Image (spheres, rainbow, N blue to C red):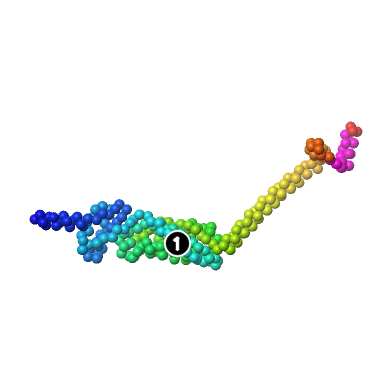
Amino acid sequence: MSYFLFLALFLITISIRQINQYQKGVRFTLGKFTSIMEPGWRLVFPIIQGYQKVDVRTKAVDVPDQNAITRDNVTVRVNAVIYYKVSDAYKAIVEVENFQYAISQYAQTTMRNIVGEVTLDELLSSRDKIAERIREIVDKETDAWGLKVQNVELKDVSLPADMERTIGKQAEAEREKRAVIINSEGELAASENISRAAAVLSATPGALHLRTLQSINDMSSDQSNTIVYMIPMEALRAMEGFTKK
């Protein structure tokens, strides 16, 4: 009796398997799927049963640099990172051989296809939208593998050296264009103010002569300056008018 008790305890001891909190176990009996093992100590009897652990934490997969041609025939190198987690441990083991490798390969193909559907300007200015399209496509395809794609980020978009120089020249030309426009708008505003000031001075008797005297006073503030000033006849007539009074 003690022999059978010892044998039973021995079999139970060697059959104990630990599933961590961040894992799930897929148990097979005689090669067939039996159940999903939750975290904790679980029994897996040798010979007749087997199991595989599946990490259900969020994982980051680095999608290496991919050469792609945009819709406007520009060659670019794009890399990305995909964040996903296992939503169904059974499918992740039974439906696909190596889900980590499979999702990486599918993401590479999808990224090249999506880049080929957009222009270079769209790729540079709408990276978030393009990343979201990649996420939707990869998530839909990998749902059958028990995976949930949470996010996709385009890390870098590299351009050929000649294209970078061209874009740099274009940006510089755009800045110069804006500077010329701003300068011309300032000159236009200044000319309008001067025109209104001239209209006010010409419409007010004696205003032009007072402005002339003020200008002479401003120029004579520095004693080292020698000023030769031609007094218009209108100013002389105005002074003559003052003396007659």
Type of amino acid at the residue the image marks with label 1: Pro
Q: Looking at the picture, how far across and down is residue 196, in whole percent?
A: 75, 44
Name the magenta segment's main secondary structure.
Answer: helix
Q: What element carries label 1?
A: strand
> Which one is nearer the viewer's eye here, 8 or 144?
8
Specify the quadrant that holds the N terminus.
bottom left
Q: Give the range drawn in magenta.
A: 227-242
As drawn, 183 above or below 124 = above
> Which one is nearer the viewer's eye here, 64 or 137?
64
Can you identify the residue that label 1 sits on? 64
Specify the quadrant that holds the C terminus.
top right
Tell whether position 228 is magenta: yes
Q: In which quarter of the image is residue 32?
A: bottom left
Q: Looking at the picture, how far across and down is residue 230, in whole percent?
A: 87, 42
Q: In which quarter of the image is residue 95?
A: bottom left
> Which one is nearer the viewer's eye here, 118 or 153?
153
Compared across the picture, whether 9 is left or right of 182 comes to left
